[in-house]
Amino acid sequence: MKYVFFFIAFSFFSLQLTAQKKDTTITVGSGAILKADTIIQSKKDTVKAHSPRKATIRSALIPGWGQAYNKKYWKVPIVYAALGTAAGFFIYNNKEYIAARDAYRNMEDKNPANDYLIPAKFSQVDPEAVRQYRIAIRQYVDYSVLAFIVLWGLNVVDATVDGHLKAFEVSEDLSMHINPTYNPISKQANVGLVFNFGRNRSSATR
């Protein structure tokens, strides 16, 4: 299951990689107040053109398709590496389960003529040990299937989140104001951050 956490870590790491264009203006007023506006630039038609719903559907149908639609191409090999690893574990564990199951059956049928069908790695092992191994490997098969389903779901969630963030990062309604101030009486400098939501961005004056 460590590959599940590996994929989650990369999904959250990608949230920190959203590119933003910055437009910074500095105005000096009374009291030596500086103001820097950092706003996200883009066009409204870009928001309309990109659909998080399309990213979700595409990623649900074909893993990695949603990431490609979001132009996060570097995530596609990660998606397939995670799913391929889970599929590889499933194939290996299922093969081991079938071998242990058949070996145990041939051990317990009391027919020496079938002993040649028992794989060499099981031929010198106690039948009860083979049975316990079969039970354990069966659980690993189930875990492999569960990991594959979870990773597929995370692939869809990642495409959906990236799709919404792509629309979010081109919004023109967000701004961050950095307001450093200096108090001549106390001779102390202060720095404040102000986040505005909405089109109305009023400038700070004194």
Image (tube, rainbow, N blue to C red):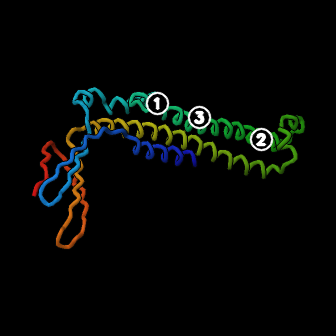
Instruction: Assign a secondary structure to mark 3.
Output: helix
Tag count in the figure?
3
Quarter of the figure that contains the C terminus: bottom left
Q: Secondary structure at mark 2?
A: helix
| Foreground label between 3 and 2 | 3
* First of labels 3, 1 by sequence position: 1
**Residue 7 relative to residue 139: left or right:** left
The image position of residue 93, as x and y in percent, is 67, 40
Tell me what residue is drawn at x 75 percent, y 42 percent: 100
Which residue lies under the disc numbered 2?
105
* Residue type indicated by callout 1: Tyr
Q: Please report the residue visible at 55 percent of the width from the left and 43 percent of the height from the top.
A: 147
The numbered dot on residue 73 is 1
Report if residue 12 is visible in the image. yes
Question: What mark, if any, has residue 84 been given in the picture?
Answer: 3
Q: Residues within 10 Å of mark 2 (few under 14, many from 20)?
A: some
N-terminal of the pair, mark 3 or mark 2, is 3
**Which mark is drawn over residue 158?**
none
User: Counting residues from the N terminus, which is met first, the one under dot 1 or under dot 2?
Assistant: 1
- Determine whether 114 is above or below 174 in the image: above
- Sort mark 1 into few (<14), some (14-19) or many (20+) by Cα contacts within 10 Å: some
Q: What residue lies at 21% left-to-right and 61% top-to-bottom? A: 181
CA gap, disc 3 and disc 2 = 32 Å
Q: Position of residue 180 (x, y in %)?
A: 23, 58
Distance (Cα) linking label 1 and label 2: 49 Å
- Residue 130 at x, y = what percent? 77, 48
SS assignment at label 1: loop
Residues at circles 3 and 1 in contact by the CB criterion of under 8 Å: no
Q: Amino acid at mark 3?
A: Gly
Q: Residue furthest right?
A: 112
Q: Nearer the viewer, mark 3 or mark 1?
A: 1
Q: Label 2 amino acid?
A: Arg
